[in-house]
Amino acid sequence: MVHTEELNVIDDAEAAKKRALKSGWSARRAMLAEFWFYFSENKGAVIGLVVFVALVLVALFAPLLAPHSPTIQNRDALLLPPFWQEGGNAAYILGTDAVGRDMLSRLIYGSRFSLFIGVIVVSVALTGGILIGLIAGFFRGWVDIVIMRVMDVILAFPSLLLALVLVAILGPGLVNAMIAIALVLQPHFVRLTRASVLSEKSKDYVVSARVAGAGPVRLMVKTILPNCLAPLIVQATLSFSTAILDAAALGFLGMGAQPPTPEWGTMLAEAREFILRAWWVVTFPGLAILVTVLAINLVGDGLRDALDPKLKRS
Amino acid sequence: MFRFVLQRISLLIPTFIGVSIVAFAFIRLLPGDPILLLAGERGMTAERYAELQQVYGYDRPLLVQYGDYLWGILQGDLGTSIVTKRPVLSEFMTLFPATLELSFCAIVFAAALGIPAGVFAAVKRGSWFDQTIMGTALVGYSMPIFWWGLLLIILFSGILGWTPVSGRISLLYYFPQPTGFMLIDSLLSGQEGAFKSAVSHLILPAIVLGTIPLAVIARQTRSAMLEVLGEDYVRTARAKGLPPLRVVGLHALRNALIPVITVIGLQVGVLLAGAILTETIFSWPGVGKWMVDSVFKRDYPVVQGGLLLIAGLVMVVNLIVDLLYGLINPRIRHN
């Protein structure tokens, strides 16, 4: 008799746990639904998201989508205009560049570089920034002072100038450009994380976790960090577009990806001398940069509206 | 207030020391020996190498070298350009007016368009006008300005033939430049058409450089206005029956301008970074192009000195913005 009662209790506990798990899951789904509700209210953000997803697909399936190779030069088709202009060729929809490479194929492959740059730079800057910001905000004292002064120093330089000089030290190239840009963008994440940590640290739930015996690492990563994520996500989106812009600018100055890489900024640098003769070699790569950056910024605006509770119902 | 000023200035000192360490470390972090770099491809004898090492002080401990460097900075000695053999500081001073003139016109353009656009967007919140302005602002904010510059050149210089492609003034004009600002000097010169030429050279670069600040200012003005328009005192002013223009222009705008002015001040870093690209595209003989050229010519003392001067400039302007903000808003000052 006692035995079955015990079993019943265990069963009840199990069921409760299952219910809790289920409700945790549905709570998460409800949160997601709420997020989507606010995000989708912003039409621009939805358009931005669609464009961004399309870009990701283009980048993933570039070899299938590109009609030509991005690097093979065709001497019979130098500086051909787009197909709708006189002298254009339907085989090269957006025309060809000065050495007869297909513009459209180069643009399609270029999307891989831009998205890759954005993902890597933001991941590096975000991870580094969160880590350093957590340490500064959590430990305070001289650790905090030293970290924040170093960040002030980085922020004192115009970002593109510092990136340019760093690339001069490291040597021109895409990887070095990405390292430089990540370093330059990182202080924003440090500041944001530190500020959120400072405002969260004295709240009751953190104090009670500390009283319950949570160690510093657990407090930092599991207790505090999840509650600081909203502004970090918004900043990450904005940094994603900044990274693409800065990498393209470095490429344009000859300090980023090197030719014949079909990176959009590098393509613009190569096209500069034909600016008054062949508008298409200048127009399309820049348009690609603009559309990509604009789409990401639209998503960023939408994320801010959806994640920032202060602005939510105003 | 005096305490506040002193406190803000003292905060700058560690940052300045950090900036000087970055500039100092720059030459030493470069791959290769700085003295062999000086010799270029000719190479040099071992004695000459030792001699030069002594001349430049590279044989002494790093800390002593840094101390010397800092002492030199404080006396205005920022090294000598390898290419032109002129002091870095005097090169900077010759080129800086061009950048200042360009940046000033860019920010005036940005503020003159951005503030009214933001105010109207806020007043007509949600209308198609608001949406168009904010959409355009986001496009401007996302603009790769090096491409934007090329597009404007294609349109206005190539197709329409309205503006020149590069430089600060037509080669036809030659006159002394007492101020270094081409707009002023061309007026002072009294030569016919000189001022017009200077303006036509300036207009495209100023628009290109002002585009991102314009977008930022319009967005900031709109959100600041929206906040202020919801305040009680604005409602009171409306309730009293004051004309809408007076409410918006006098009561709301004056308070909304505080964050806007801060944002304008903080654009100096954006402007200097943008100047690197804009000056390169338009062959504008300013500090930004000088830095890019020096990086390519491996004129490292110039890069080092320029880095320090530009960072110093950004810091000083940010300090001024900070102090002005404290002056306008006592809450900041007494915190």
Image: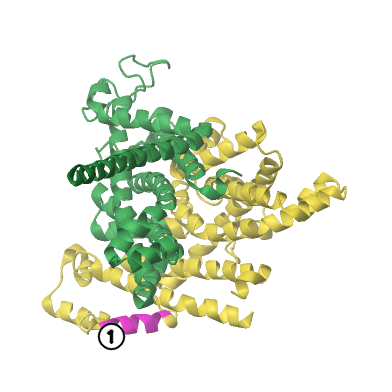
- Determine the image quadrant of residue A60: top left
Camera-nearest residue between A130 and B277: A130
Q: Can residue B43 be seen in this view?
A: yes
Asked whether A279 falls inside the magenta stretch, the response is no
User: Where residue A25 sits in the image (x, y, percent)?
Assistant: 34, 39
Report the predominant secondary structure element of the magenta stretch. helix
Q: Is residue A278 visible?
A: no
| Image vertical order of residue B73 relative to residue B244, above or below | below
Q: Mark 1 — residue?
A: B64
Hey, what amino acid is under mark 1? Answer: Val
Protein chain holding label 1: B
Task: Identify the residue at horizontal 30%, vertical 55% (top origin).
Answer: A127
Camera-nearest residue between B228 and A99: B228
| Image vertical order of residue B127 relative to residue B177, above or below | above
Q: Quadrant of the C terminus of chain A?
A: top right
Task: Identify the residue at horizontal 37%, vertical 47% (top origin).
Answer: A243
Q: Chain A is drawn in which colour?
A: green
Task: Identify the residue at horizontal 41%, vertical 61% (top origin).
Answer: A205
User: Where residue B231 sits in the image (x, y, percent)?
Assistant: 72, 53
Number of numbered callouts drawn:
1
User: Where residue A213 sits in the image (x, y, percent)?
Assistant: 29, 67
Q: Colour of chain B?
A: yellow
Camera-nearest residue between A77 and B22: B22
Q: Which stretch did the figure color magenta?
A: B63-73
Q: In which quarter of the image is the N terminus of chain A?
A: top left
User: Where residue B54 sits in the image (x, y, percent)?
Assistant: 22, 83
